[in-house]
């Protein structure tokens, strides 16, 4: 099976959009199972994930397997036309395994061994864990590889959510093996890690350790390589399970990614090619300043991992989660709005954790499709309503999102950026990424999230926020794109180090100096509360530089004080294209204005739309589907002029989008304008 060769809609069993959930029948009696499948049919559910945490249920002691209950639930679901996303059951260890082999438990950087009792209590490098887990996978895949209910294999669950970084002796040995393969010689390792600093030079491989707790700052390249190793180690585990599954089944194989703001331990650019279907788990994070924007970013990033093809939202919530400091319930209509935002941005399937709310365990206050209150509840009514909406949107399946702008994002750069001993601890990689994305999102510019070095030829504008770590080849790809007529915007603290965390000398921003036509001699981070004025009437924050123009023109400059006259925003002609540079953190409005200007210079038409109205287009052949998502508290109107409304009610060629609602319009007009509005459509001023 190859990435993007398996249509997500085939997982529904009838070519429709996937609507599903996690289901934990082991928590319920057989009488409840019967009720559940009837209610699933009522809601329109067509795919359920089971056996995610089934290990102890299937193997009560070493080699003592029991599949009767799993047989029964698979047959019951199949009988009712509901497909199965079958978990391998290996996500969490049974108590007997950690009792027999406590050495498989993961260890933190300060040497503390984790105890069992939660989940994912295993070291990714443990050969003992892998032996027992793969033995279970062999049993499960042999038994169910040809079962007609199984439409997707679900390897483990949220790999690396809790145990991505293990520092035990087994991990240390595996880390040394990974380093030997990467560098071949100890001399090469010493050179790349810069071990002449602080007398860190290694004279034997046995001296090399993971970056365990130290009394001072870490070696940054050691930390970076440990992150790379840890991501690869978990990917290797995934591949071991997938290999067994593919020996006994032709059903597609995947696992659920966690493209979200609070997880950064996996480099999913390297994982994506190994998936038959790209799937993601996403939960609205109310700890963030703009959770709705982050939802859109995560959806776009997941679409990027799928190389623009449709993908599967394997988990999200109907209402509150249980793991945030304040678990805020979703307002009426919010669940449907969030769900359809994922759909608008490329998902062909929407699944929830979970079907029936648990009454025991640490997730008993996590929302579900069927809440504790039962069917006489607002959440249940919205679940049924969403199922009906997806039925009406069946034709959207297989269509794709078209974007004229790209945003370059890197997990490696994230690992390297957020380290100690940098010019300022007030700046963070994801903050810079989200700030740039939010400006584009608010301007109505749909973007594709791409990896460094990606082919940018299909885009008019490439935005590169905070790419502190970048390979020479990837930097050259951006320069070639601009020289060939492309437009780019790069933000501060980009291009500083190579892939080995080695600073490029000769002036900042290193890899991008020639492209941007500037040279910075010294970083000048700003103190908290220091917001120097800019000559465009706004103010800067966080960062400034001793910037010198070497061909670029100043678009915005500092005024007053020692920064007076220093450029804050520059623009440079490079070959047939143009490259912008932001040497400070701009206020939100100023950043949006700058990015809008860069987009306009690139030939992207940015049409105005009411604040809070998100517009995204999916296209297939000569048809386009316009999603109108109203995040505001005000009603909006949208002229459709003969186009067809799929979701909502039409009044005299006008779509009314109530506060918090979503409307979907079908059009035969080509859908390539930047703001998602097909030619001939326009926003109508609200009453």
Image (spheres, rainbow, N blue to C red):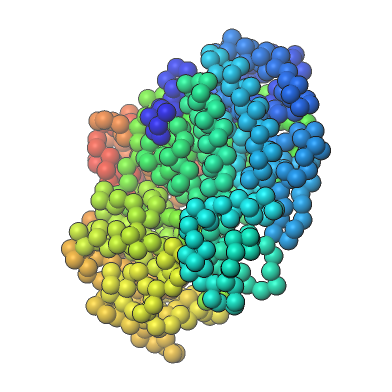
**Residue 659 image position (x, y, % from top left):** 50, 43
**Residue under the point 52% across and 79% down:** 526
Occupied quadrant, residue 598: bottom left
Q: Left or right? Give the position of 5 relative to 265.
A: left
Q: Quadrant of the N terminus?
A: top left
Q: Residue furthest left?
A: 576
**Residue 379 image position (x, y, % from top left):** 64, 31
Q: Residue furthest front?
A: 204
Count the labels in the image. Answer: 0
**Residue 189 image position (x, y, % from top left):** 51, 64
Q: Residue furthest bottom?
A: 562
Instruction: For residue 548, say whether it is visible.
Output: yes
Q: Left or right? Give the position of 17 relative to 204.
A: left
463 is higher (above) or lower (below) than 383? below
Q: Left or right? Give the position of 190 relative to 513.
A: right
Closer to us: 541 or 12: 12
Closer to us: 161 or 663: 161
């Amino acid at each position: 099976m190859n990435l993007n060769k398996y249509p997500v809609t085939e997982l529904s069993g009838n070519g429709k959009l996937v609507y599903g959930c996690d289901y934990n029948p082991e928590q319920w009696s057989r009488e409840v199972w019967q009720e559940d499948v009837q209610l699933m049919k009522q809601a329109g559910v067509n795919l359920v994930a089971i056996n995610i945490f089934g290990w102890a249920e299937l193997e009560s002691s070493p080699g003592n397997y029991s599949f009767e209950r799993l047989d029964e639930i698979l047959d019951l679901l199949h009988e009712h036309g509901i497909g199965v996303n079958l978990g391998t059951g290996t996500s969490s260890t049974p108590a007997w395994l950690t009792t027999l082999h406590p050495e498989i438990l993961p260890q933190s950087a300060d040497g503390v061994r984790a105890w069992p009792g939660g989940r994912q209590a295993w070291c990714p490098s443990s050969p003992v864990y892998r032996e027992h887990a793969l033995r279970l996978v062999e049993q499960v895949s042999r038994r169910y590889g040809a079962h007609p209910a199984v439409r997707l294999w679900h390897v483990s669950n949220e790999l690396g959510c809790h145990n991505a970084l293990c520092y035990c002796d087994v991990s240390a040995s595996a880390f040394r093996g990974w380093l030997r393969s990467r560098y071949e010689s100890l001399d090469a390792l010493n050179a790349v890690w810069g071990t002449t600093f602080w007398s860190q030079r290694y004279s034997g491989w046995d001296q090399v350790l993971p970056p365990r707790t130290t009394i001072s700052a870490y070696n940054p390249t050691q930390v970076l390589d440990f992150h790379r190793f840890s991501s690869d180690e978990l990917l290797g585990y995934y591949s071991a399970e997938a290999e067994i599954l593919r020996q006994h089944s032709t059903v597609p194989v995947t696992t659920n990614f966690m493209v979200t703001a609070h997880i950064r331990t996996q480099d999913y650019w390297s994982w994506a090619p190994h998936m038959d279907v790209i799937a993601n788990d996403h939960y609205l994070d109310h700890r963030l300043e703009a959770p709705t924007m982050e939802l859109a970013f995560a959806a776009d990033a997941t679409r990027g991992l799928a190389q623009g093809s449709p993908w599967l939202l394997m988990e999200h919530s109907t209402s509150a989660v249980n793991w945030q400091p304040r678990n805020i319930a979703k307002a009426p209509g919010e669940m449907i709005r969030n769900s359809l935002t994922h759909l608008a941005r490329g998902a062909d399937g929407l699944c929830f954790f979970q079907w029936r709310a648990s009454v025991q365990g640490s997730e008993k206050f996590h929302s579900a499709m069927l809440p504790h209150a039962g069917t006489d509840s607002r959440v249940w009514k919205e679940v049924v309503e969403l199922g009906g909406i997806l039925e009406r949107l069946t034709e959207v399946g297989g269509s794709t999102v078209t974007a004229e702008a790209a945003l370059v994002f890197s997990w490696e750069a994230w690992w390297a950026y957020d380290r100690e001993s940098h010019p300022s601890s007030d700046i963070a990689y994801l903050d810079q990424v989200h700030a740039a994305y939010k400006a584009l999102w608010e301007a109505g510019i749909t973007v594709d999230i791409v990896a460094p070095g990606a082919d940018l030829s299909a885009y008019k504008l490439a935005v590169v926020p905070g790419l502190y770590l970048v390979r020479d080849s990837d930097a050259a790809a951006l320069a070639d794109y601009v020289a060939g007529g492309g437009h780019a915007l790069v933000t501060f603290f980009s291009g500083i180090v190579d892939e080995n965390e080695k600073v490029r000398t000769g002036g900042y921003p290193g890899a991008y100096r020639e492209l941007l036509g500037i040279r910075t001699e010294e970083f000048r981070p700003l103190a908290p509360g220091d917001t120097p004025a800019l000559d465009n009437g706004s103010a800067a924050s966080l960062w400034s530089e001793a910037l010198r123009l070497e061909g670029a023109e100043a678009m915005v400059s500092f005024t007053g004080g020692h920064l007076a006259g220093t450029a804050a925003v520059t623009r440079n002609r490079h070959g047939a294209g143009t490259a912008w540079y932001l040497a400070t953190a701009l206020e939100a409005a100023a950043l949006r204005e700058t990015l809008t200007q860069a987009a306009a210079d690139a030939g992207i038409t940015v049409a105005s739309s009411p604040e809070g109205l998100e517009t995204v287009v999916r296209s297939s052949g000569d048809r386009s589907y316009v999603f109108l998502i109203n995040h505001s508290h005000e009603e909006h109107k949208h002229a459709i002029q003969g186009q067809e409304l799929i979701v909502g009610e039409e009044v005299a060629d006008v779509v009314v989008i109530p506060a918090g609602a979503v409307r979907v319009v079908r059009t035969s007009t080509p859908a390539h304008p930047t703001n998602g509005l097909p030619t001939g459509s326009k926003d109508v001023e609200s009453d």
